[in-house]
Image (tube, rainbow, N blue to C red):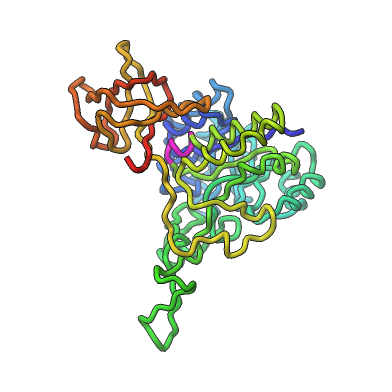
Amino acid sequence: MRHPELLIPASCLEVLKTAVIFGADAVYIGGEAFGLRAKAKNFSMEEMAQGIEFAHAHGVKVYVTANILAHNYDLEGVEQYFRELKEIHPDALIIADPGVFMIAKRICPEIERHISTQANNTNYETFRFWYDLGAKRVVSARELSMAELKTIRKRIPEDLEIETFVHGAMCISYSGRCLLSNYFTGRDANHGACTHPCRWKYAVVEETRPGEYLPVEENERGTYIFNSKDLCMIEHIPDLIDAGIDSLKVEGRMKTALYVATVARTYRKALDDYAQDPALYEAHLDWYREQISNCTYRQFTTGFFYGKPDHEAQIYDSNTYVKEYTYLGIVGALRADGCCRIEQRNKFCVGDQIEIMKPDGRNVCTQVLEIQDAEGAAMPSAPHPKQVLWLRLTEQAEEYDILRAAAAL
């Protein structure tokens, strides 16, 4: 039986540390250029070096995305970028463009090269093609079924790894290669500047009746015809392992630390439970479902794994997320008097009931007894985003714990 890697996204150094502590085997990050999440916070070279050092100290790998579809004017910068990455030793580069792949092979051959889903990897000959060029891993196209993945596993070299998306947002495009953003806004999704037009509301207009909007679905609120439900395979870990998947990948390089902690912790426990005893995994399915719904999501689907999605995989009446918890902050330093330091992310008050979310799976209810600013002055509430605060709670928090509150708070 394969024991697949759990691969978690990180938008910044804080989220990378959260992913590591909450159960990732590997994290993937983007630098300030040449990745497909230009609007994410992303990492400076110094932050990448710090993140790689932190992850490696905890036995976790770091992969860097360089998966744009490059133009001529990109190539000189790509070469310089790879020379800089060579000095900080990431474990792999995630690449879509053949030209970028060859530059990486020439400049930093010691760093593994993984082929991005943007390369449209839909058959075993494509996997073999990249293997013969020196790729260590290929990320499967999201359009593949479980049966197709099994066939690929049987028809490729044993040491070629398969990475597959198992959780997160779905693109209304082929393997993420979308032109809607370019057409509507001039911002190239294949260059990292997607404006997410698949989440917008659409209607049909008949050319002789301008201004008369006809809903695509019979719903007075309009329709979001490109708006897919989010992928979630937490209930299908046995099938993924049976298919021979080497790395289970979570989408979300623009997500919060709360999202990353929730997903990483839940999939970590599911994988560990199944490795220990499949019956244990089955017994905890309700717990996985409950926990995974504690992060923001747009309902759930199994995507293409069990056949092509039908209309039930789309959300026609809204593009909003379900949000059951609000992210308050990550616990940093601890003082001798028991107070914990956070950088606040959403408002809360003295007297509020909140939760301490721990990496081991526990959610500890606690009350906020006291809030102090960085200088130690008492505050009745925490209304200012990113303000450094010291909290006294009724329960003990530890470094890297997540503080969250029920969304109704």
Q: Quadrant of the N terminus?
A: top right
The image quarter in which residue 173 lies: bottom right
Asked whether 57 or 219 is in front, the reply is 219
Magenta segment includes 258: yes
For the question of whether residue 48 can be seen, the reply is yes
Residue found at the far top of this picture: 336
Magenta segment includes 262: no
Stretch of the chain drawn in magenta: 256-261
Image vertical order of residue 34 relative to residue 365, above or below: below
Taking the image as shown, residue 187 lies to the left or right of residue 107, namely: left
Q: Quadrant of the C terminus?
A: top left
Report the residue at 56% width, 36% height from top.
Answer: 287
Q: How many marks?
A: 0
Image vertical order of residue 266 relative to residue 146, above or below: above
Report the residue at 26% width, 29% height from top.
Answer: 351
Asked whether 316 or 194 is in front, the reply is 316
Q: Main secondary structure of the magenta part?
A: helix
Asked whether 99 or 198 is in front, the reply is 198
Percent across and percent down for residue 219 are 44, 70
Percent across and percent down for residue 363 are 46, 28
For the question of whether residue 82 can be seen, the reply is no
Residue found at the far left of this picture: 377
The image quarter in which residue 331 lies: top left
Percent across and percent down for residue 129 are 74, 49
Report the residue at 33% width, 20% height from top.
Answer: 394
Percent across and percent down for residue 98 are 63, 50
Image vertical order of residue 366 relative to residue 326, above or below: above
Taking the image as shown, residue 40 lies to the left or right of residue 307, namely: left
Residue found at the far right of this picture: 155
